[in-house]
Image (tube, rainbow, N blue to C red):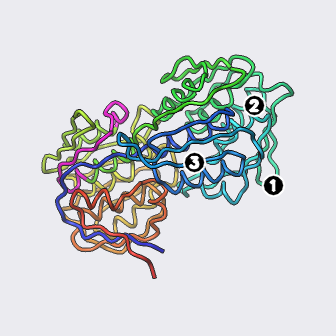
Amino acid sequence: MDKIIIRGGKSLSGRIPISGAKNSALTLLPCALLTDEPLTLRNLPRLADVDSFGHLLNQLGVSTMIEGARPEDFGRVMTLRAGRVTATVAPYDIVRKMRASILVLGPLLARAGEATVSLPGGCAIGNRPIDLHLKALEALGAEIEITAGYVTARAPKGGLPGGDFGFPVVSVGATENALMAAVLAKGTSTLRNAAREPEIVDLCNLLVAMGAHIEGIGQSTLVIHGKDRLHGATYRVMADRIEAGSYACAAAITGSPLDLIGAKLDEMEATVAALRQAGVQVDEIADGIAVRPNGTLNAVTLSTAPFPGFATDMQAQFMAMLCMAQGASVLTETIFENRYMHVPELNRMGAHIEVKGRTAVVHGVNRMVGAPVMATDLRASMSLIIAGLAAEGETEVSRIYHLDRGYERLEEKLQAVGADIERVGGD
């Protein structure tokens, strides 16, 4: 199994291109099921999860053709076509590897009238039930049955009628599934307390480009007027705000000036606000954002929250950065109950972090030291990379298959700005 070796303490400088957003790409891909015409996605990141999702779609009858990157994009171009849906079952052996596979449920139900999807897997960061996905689809008119580890959803004869649903708590995935089901419903659907993440806006914009009629994009109430059919489209995947935030943390902990090309300030305002609170200068430039640390990092108090709050997907990276801040930082994780698995690994590198329930207190230290550490999930993996860039000596990060699920060409991008980092084969 591959490992990443980092010899830390190097100053970084230069430009890092930000890839297409993983969390957006995995939502846009299943939209191919909503039409029999070609859907072309540009700026698609080269990631294990994207490949796995493409394989799942192939199982359902979707053809996929991949081209190289265009000059204005960093990622690939993929054209998908579901001329005919040949299967409506998403099997366990694929779905268990990637939680986002549940996002075929809504579009399959809308297009084919039925869908059977294995209960999902994904990173072990806590309980992530799909009950809101199912309740939202029921509100749109679906009949739901769960047997032997599979969810089966069926639409009435003639298709989903549409309906109203208020999410008791904000759920990104459930909002996405309900949106994709509602666009082909026979009537009008209203989703209240819907997620507002930029990735949701990206999904809505693609659906509109395919002919959907959606009101309230970017707001917590979405009104979807169902259409009989959607058409194909060509669409560019948004830049990955979590990847951009991760490299901003790397710049901050190493005291290095980095330009993040393609990142958009208005899509990561909570992350930028937290960086500025920590004493890091962040400015918008013509083709992205510039991160300019001021020499020392200040302790901060942060609590994760649904957008526009501070993203749970940035918590681990900020924790790594704050290990070398002055004073004690307090981080509270409100979204997932098991998202501090990186803490013991950071402490092995000389960090001083105490966890009490969902709150972590990060006591800043003057130095960190490289050590063998093990990645436990996607964002935790990146926290160890960030810490390793600043640590003295050599850090060896194992189980990096997590990283390959969410960070495209990580070593290549960091090497280009001066990091001493390499991937090596395991024993």
Horizontally, residue 160 falls left or right of residue 210, namely right
Q: What's the mark number on residue 65?
A: 3
In the image, taking residue 75 as reference, residue 324 lies left or right, namely left
- Residues tagged 2 and 1 counted as in contact (Cβ below 8 A): no
Label 1 neighbour load within 10 Å: few <14, some 14-19, many 20+: few
- Bounds of the magenta segment: 251-270
List the residue tagged with mark 1: 148
Residue ID at (42%, 41%): 311
Q: Amino acid at mark 2?
A: Glu
Residue at 32% over, 74% down: 371
The quarter of the picture where residue 221 lies is top right
Please identify, in this view, whether the residue under mark 2 or under mark 3 is nearer the observer. 3
Mark 1 vs 3, N-terminal side: 3
Is disc 1 in contact with disc 3, using a CB cutoff of under 8 Å?
no
Viewer-nearest of labels 1 and 3?
A: 3
Residue 160, magenta (yes or no): no
Q: Nearer the viewer, residue 221 or 186?
A: 186
Residue matched to label 2: 138
Residue 400 placement (x, y as % from top left): 44, 66
